[in-house]
Image (tube, rainbow, N blue to C red):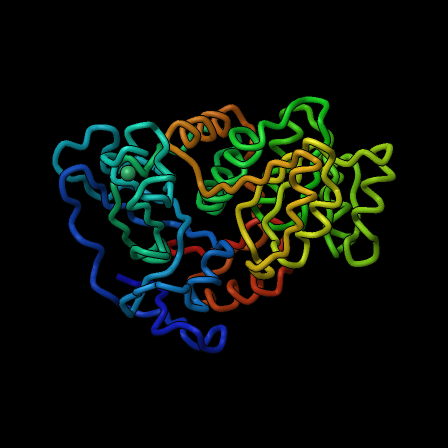
């Protein structure tokens, strides 16, 4: 099958990426399906995998890509939820459904949790084999979801949903600060916050992206390159700060995030695109009753809920650009430069 693979990690950006033929994804076993991928979407995760993650034990060539959508090609024994020919979305987080966390319904806390494209062969290939738990039928929408939109849906929507709804429990009337609008998780967090009736302050270093954010419902936008975010947030909230901060930047924004937080506020983080090491003055945490919470992906119930919402016309993915498979390297570069507004997608099989 045709695939985009890494031949190694840690080198120059496009240097380790190769479009080539590799062995077909395995024939599906009991409880598995094999999907003919139409489109795959990029996430920051893909950049981290390319750079080389600590403790990672990739076998090369490694098929990249966590997000994808396509058509069920074949199914293993006992699979009744989907049939060959069904159009499906892929949930990239693979759980064993047997450990105590899975049995408690927390599949993204699974002790053997694995992601497509990170620990397992990914979606930027003509075929992917995965558990039937990890596919959901593409909802019927008008206008119909494009393959690019379908591929762009799962990872960021699931991540943002769990962060904002399950973890931070953002409520109507509260104010949330969302850093770096333009990135998929931040954009989706903004849209979920508006669905919940919250007030959103969004930041970017790019005024054009801020204008787009306002069009999507952001109440206030701040340019974090030219404005001191904590000062502006204080001014906008009668010096109180915001109830919730949605973080995925890490080192570059952490201190400011805490300065923006109201007493009793909640900070939820799912990433560290600028670096993972931050300083934390514990006195500020206990004195102000801050809650700092981590979040990764989401469980099966949350995934079913976001697919249901998609079917109701909510949270339709925003696609930045679509590249043919042959130009996957260019797609990676666009993401690495942070130029995108919405998801960068690669068409695997037009
Ligand atoms: Zn488990």
Is 196 left or right of 100, judged from the image as shown? right
Is 105 left or right of 320, judged from the image as shown? left
Give the vertical position of 95 relative to 312 (above or below): below
Residue 57 on image: x %, y %:
30, 65
Quadrant assignment for the N terminus? bottom left
In the depicted view, which residue is nearer to us: 6 or 201? 201
Number of callouts: 0
Residue 72 on image: x %, y %:
27, 41
- Residue visible at 23% across and 37% down? 84
Q: Quadrant of residue 168?
A: top right
Give the vertical position of 324 relative to 39 (above or below): below
In the depicted view, which residue is nearer to us: 164 or 79? 164
Residue 154 on image: x %, y %:
45, 41
In the depicted view, which residue is nearer to us: 98 or 1? 98
Q: Quadrant of residue 177?
A: top right
**Ligand 1 is found in which quarter of the picture?**
top left
- Residue visible at 67% across and 58% down? 252
Q: Quadrant of residue 205?
A: bottom right
Is 208 left or right of 316, judged from the image as shown? right
Is 312 left or right of 84, judged from the image as shown? right
In the depicted view, which residue is nearer to us: 286 or 342? 286
Residue 125 on image: x %, y %:
33, 57
- Residue visible at 43% across and 67% down? 50
């Amino acid at each position: 099958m045709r695939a985009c693979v890494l031949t190694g990690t840690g080198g120059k950006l496009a240097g380790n990426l190769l479009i080539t033929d590799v062995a077909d994804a395995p024939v599906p076993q009991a409880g598995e399906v094999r999907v003919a991928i139409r489109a795959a979407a990029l996430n920051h995760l893909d950049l981290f995998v390319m750079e080389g993650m600590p403790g990672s034990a990739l076998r090369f060539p490694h098929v990249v890509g966590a997000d994808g959508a396509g058509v069920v090609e074949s199914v293993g024994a006992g699979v009744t939820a989907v049939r060959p020919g069904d159009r499906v979305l892929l949930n990239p987080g693979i759980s064993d459904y047997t450990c105590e966390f899975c049995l408690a319904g927390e599949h993204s806390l699974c002790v053997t949790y694995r992601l497509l494209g990170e620990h397992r062969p990914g979606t930027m290939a003509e075929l992917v084999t995965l558990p039937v738990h990890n596919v959901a039928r593409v909802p019927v929408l008008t206008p119909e979801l494009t393959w690019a939109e379908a591929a762009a849906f799962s990872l960021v929507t699931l991540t943002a949903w769990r962060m904002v709804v399950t973890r931070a429990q953002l409520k109507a009337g509260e104010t949330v600060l969302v850093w770096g609008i333009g990135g998929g998780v931040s954009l989706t967090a903004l849209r979920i916050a508006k669905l919940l009736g919250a007030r959103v302050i969004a930041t970017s270093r790019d005024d054009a992206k801020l204008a787009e954010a306002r069009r999507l419902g952001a109440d206030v936008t701040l340019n974090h390159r030219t404005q001191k975010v904590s000062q502006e947030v204080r001014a906008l909230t009668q010096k109180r700060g915001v109830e919730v901060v949605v973080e995925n930047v890490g080192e570059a924004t952490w201190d400011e995030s805490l300065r923006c937080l109201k007493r009793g506020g909640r900070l939820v983080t799912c990433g560290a695109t600028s670096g993972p090491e931050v300083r934390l003055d514990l006195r500020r945490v206990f004195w102000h009753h801050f809650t700092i919470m981590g979040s990764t992906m989401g469980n099966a119930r949350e995934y079913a809920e976001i697919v249901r919402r998609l079917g109701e016309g909510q949270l339709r993915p925003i696609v930045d650009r679509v590249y043919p498979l042959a130009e996957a390297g260019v797609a990676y570069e666009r993401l690495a430069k942070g130029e995108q507004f919405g998801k960068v997608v690669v068409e695997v099989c037009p």
